[in-house]
Image (cartoon, rainbow, N blue to C red):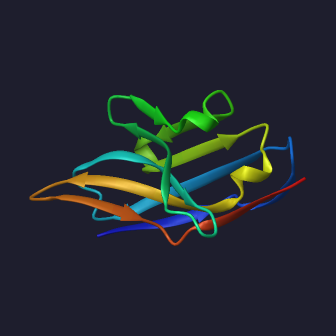
């Protein structure tokens, strides 16, 4: 199974920036995508941004132009640069991995809190 070490969450004012990082380890053979999901209170977990092994990205519409995902494949690490943060970005952010081996698996980390104050 895949394990994660997540960091970078915190409290910032609207318009500020944060950079999240996540290092994946364990059963990473067959890993073909890394990224971030988030969940706000009373809401369902939703995709924020992902990047597959070919470099193809997928972003939630509301973060396009503000958030940038990147990867260091040698370290199995994914980053999320978040700029122009808004109060509606407040959520627990979860690192995500997709693994294709004998079967396909989705994994999420324990999460890191991001709070944006107005």
Q: Is residue 46 left or right of residue 63?
A: left
Using the rendered image of the protein, determine whether residue 68 is visible from the camera's viewpoint.
Answer: no
2 vs 58, left or right, is left
In the rendered image, the vertical position of residue 18 relative to residue 24, given as above or below: above
Furthest toward the front, the residue is 42
Residue 113 in view: yes
Q: Position of residue 24 (x, y in %)?
A: 43, 59
In the image, residue 88 lies at what x, y percent? 73, 51
Q: Relative to the observer, which residue lies in front, 32 or 58?
A: 58
x%, y% of residue 78?
51, 47
Residue drawn at point x = 79 percent, y = 44 percent: 17
**Residue located at (56% from left, 68% from top):** 111
The number of numbered badges drawn on the structure is 0
Front residue (pair 69, 38): 38
Q: Is residue 87 left or right of residue 28?
A: right
Q: Quadrant of residue 29?
A: bottom left
Quarter holding the N terminus is: bottom left
Determine whether 110 is above or below 114 in the image: below
Q: x and y percent of residue 37 in the render?
A: 50, 54
Q: Quadrant of residue 11?
A: bottom right
Give left or right: position of 70 versus 1.
right
């Amino acid at each position: 199974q895949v394990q994660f070490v997540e960091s970078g969450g915190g409290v910032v004012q609207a318009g500020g920036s944060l950079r999240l990082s996540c290092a994946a380890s364990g059963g990473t053979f067959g890993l073909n995508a890394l990224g971030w999901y988030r969940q706000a209170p009373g809401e369902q977990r939703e995709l924020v941004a992902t990047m597959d092994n070919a470099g193809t990205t997928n972003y939630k519409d509301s973060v396009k132009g503000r958030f940038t995902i990147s990867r260091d494949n040698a370290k199995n690490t994914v980053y999320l640069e978040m700029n122009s943060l808004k109060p509606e970005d407040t959520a627990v952010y979860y690192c995500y991995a997709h693994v294709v081996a004998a079967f396909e698996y989705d994994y999420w980390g324990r999460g890191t809190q991001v709070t944006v104050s107005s």
